[in-house]
Amino acid sequence: MGTSLLCLATALIGGLLLSRLTKKINLPAVTGYLVAGILIGPFVLGQLGVSGLGFQSLEQVETMNIITQTALGFIAFTIGNEFRLSQLKKMGSSAITIGILQAVITTLVVDAILIALHFCFPEIITIPCAITLGAIASATAPAATLMVVRQYKADGPLTRLLMLVVAIDDAVGLVLFSVSFGVATALSHGQVSVLAVVVEPIVEIILSLVLGSLMGWLLNFVEQFFHSRSKRMTISVAFVLLTVGLSQLKFQIAGVHCGFSLLLVCMMTGTIFCNICPTSEELMERVDNWVMPLNVLFFVISGAELDMNVLAQPVTIIVGVVYIFARSLGKYYGSAISCKLTHQSKPITDNLGITLLPQAGVALGMALTASSLENGELVRNVVLFAVLIYELVGPALTKRSLLKVGEIRPEGSTSARRHNEPKEH
C-alpha cells in the first residue's frame, strides 16, 4: 500500500509540474499529464528500480485500473450533462447524423486503405486485422476532448456540437466494432456468429441505456433528501461510483453474453439527471472540482500504460503510420461531408474533424478484444502506437481548432490564491 501511495503521489506531482511546462509552450495540460506518465512509467523512471519512484512494470500500472475506470465514469457522467433538452432541440438531429456518418466514413476509409496495403504487401497485414482496425478507427477519446474544453472554458457552436458527437461516437463505435470483429473472426475461422455480430452489441447498448436511465432517476430521487451542498455533492459522487461498479457486471441470458458499456451507462446517468434535476448545473460544478485530481491521475496513468516496446517494431510503425494517416483522413473528410449534409457553418465544417482525432481508452479496449484474432497482436500494437501519437498531438490540435473559431477565451494571468484576511474581533 505504501508503494502504491508513493506512486500516486509521484503521478499527481509529476503531472502538475509537467502541466506548468506545457503551458509555457502553449500546449494543453492534458499533454503534460501524458508526458509525465511516460516519464514515471516502466520505460523511464521505472527502469531505475526505486520503489515508489514511478511504476516499475506495466503490471504495476494495471493495478491502478480502478482509478482509471472511476475517472472515465466521472468524465462520461460530465459529458452526459451536455445532453440537455435545450441543446438537443437546437442540434440533436444534426449531432446524431454527424456522429453516425463520420464514424462510418472513417471505418470505410481505413478499411479501404489497409486492405489495399494487404494486397500490396500480404506479409505485413491480414484482411481480418485490416477490417478490425477500420472499426477501431471510429472511436474517439472523450476524456482528452473534455479536459481541453474545461481547461480553456471553451464555448460556442463547435464546442457544443463536438461534445454531443463525442458522446454519440461511443455507441456507434461499439456497433461498428462488433460487426467488423464478427466478420474478421469469420474470415479467420470460417464461421460467423449472429449472436456476436448483431444481438450482443444491441443488447449491450440497450442494457447500458436502461441502467443509466435508472441510475439517473435514482440519483435525482435520493439527492432531494439532502440540502447541504457538501452532502449533495457526496451523494452524487457515491452514485457515480455505484454506477461504475454496476457497469462492470457481466452475465449470460439464454446463451447471450450480456454486459454494459461504462461510458454509455455513465453518460446516460448524467443525461437523465441533468434534465430532471433543477439544480443539476450547480451540483455538476462542485463534482467537477472534486474529481480534478482523479482526472489528472487518469491521464498520467494512461501515459504510464503506453508500451514503448512498440516503437522497436518496424512493422508496427509502418502499419501504424498508415493507420494514423487513414484515420485522420476519414475523421476530417467524414466530418466535413456530414457537416455539409446537415448545413453547418464553414468554421464548424472545416474544424470539427480535427477535434475528433484524440483516441485512447475505448480504442485500447477494442484492441485488447481483437488480440484474440490470428495475428491480432499487430492490431493491439498498432492501436498502442496510434494512441501514443494521438494523445500527445490530439489535445493540441483540438485547442488550435477551438482557438481558430474563437471559442476559447484568452488565458489571463489570474491566480486562484487568496491571502488570509485578518479576522475582526
Image (tube, rainbow, N blue to C red):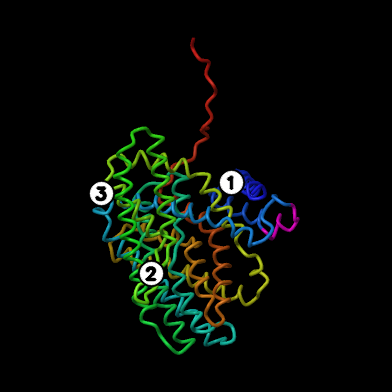
Answer few, some or many: residues within 10 Å of disc 3's Cα (few below 14, many 20 plus, some between 14 and 19): few
* Residue 370 tag number: none
Name which residue lies at 40% across and 68% down: 251
Of the numbered discs 2 and 1, the one sitting upstream in the chain is 1
- What is the spatial separation of the Cα atoms under label 1 and label 3, in whole angstroms? 35 Å
Magenta stretch, residue numbers: 42-50
In the displayed structure image, the side of residue 155 where residue 87 appears, left or right: left
Q: Which residue is mark 3?
A: 86
- What is the spatial separation of the Cα atoms under label 2 and label 1, in whole angstroms? 40 Å
Of the numbered discs 1 and 3, the one sitting upstream in the chain is 1
- Looking at the picture, which amino acid does disc 2 mark? Cys
- The image quarter in which residue 236 lies: top left
Q: Which residue is mark 2?
A: 258
Q: Is residue 264 above or below residue 310?
A: above
Q: Is residue 408 above or below residue 122?
A: above
- Which sits in the foreground, 91 or 220? 220
Do tag 2 and tag 3 residues touch (Cβ < 8 Å)? no
Q: Secondary structure at mark 2?
A: strand
- Looking at the picture, which amino acid does disc 3 mark? Ser
Q: Which residue is mark 1?
A: 19
Of the numbered discs 2 and 3, the one sitting upstream in the chain is 3
